[in-house]
Image (cartoon, rainbow, N blue to C red):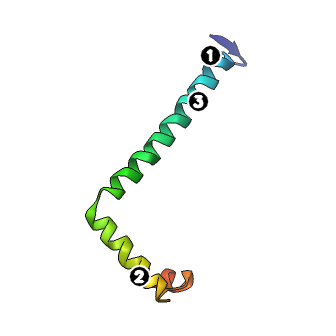
């Protein structure tokens, strides 16, 4: 531990920080893939997505401004 100007700091080697960042990136990718898998396995979600796609193909869409007004 190093004390500079009354502040205690701990020096961490760059390789340790790099390793932590790499682990975090891998966790984020895994979490995203797990979420995709969970949604793709949910019959209700699939049903809603298919309905939304049909509406979109038929041109039944709303602008972002319309959606914001509804909120």
The residues tagged by marks 3 and 1 sit, at their Cα atoms, a distance apart of 21 Å
Residue marked by disc 1: 10
The quadrant of the image that shows the N terminus is top right
Q: Is residue 1 above or below residue 50?
A: above
Residue 27 relative to residue 12: left or right: left
Q: Nearer the viewer, residue 22 or 48?
A: 48
Residue 17 relative to residue 47: left or right: right
Residue 62 relative to residue 8: left or right: left
Label 1: few (<14), some (14–19) or many (≥20) C-alpha neighbours in 10 Å: few
Q: State the mark number for residue 54.
A: 2
Image depth: mark 1 or mark 2 in front: 2
Q: Nearer the viewer, residue 3 or 60?
A: 60
Sooner in the amino-acid sequence: mark 3 or mark 1: 1
Coordinates of residue 12 in the picture (x, y in percent): 64, 17
How many numbered circles are shown? 3
As drawn, which residue projects farthest toward the top? 1
Secondary structure beneath dot 1 equals loop
Q: Is residue 17 above or below residue 53?
A: above
Residue marked by disc 3: 22
The residues tagged by marks 2 and 3 sit, at their Cα atoms, a distance apart of 40 Å
Q: Quadrant of residue 55?
A: bottom left
Secondary structure beneath dot 2 equals helix
Q: Does residue 7 show up?
A: no
Coordinates of residue 57 in the picture (x, y in percent): 48, 84
Sooner in the amino-acid sequence: mark 2 or mark 3: 3
């Amino acid at each position: 531990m190093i004390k500079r100007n009354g502040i205690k700091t701990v020096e961490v080697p760059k390789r340790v920080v790099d390793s932590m960042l790499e682990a975090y990136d891998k966790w984020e990718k895994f979490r995203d893939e797990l979420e995709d898998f969970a949604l793709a396995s949910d019959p209700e979600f699939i049903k809603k997505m298919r309905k939304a796609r049909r509406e979109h193909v038929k041109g039944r869409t709303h602008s972002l401004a319309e959606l914001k007004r509804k909120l």
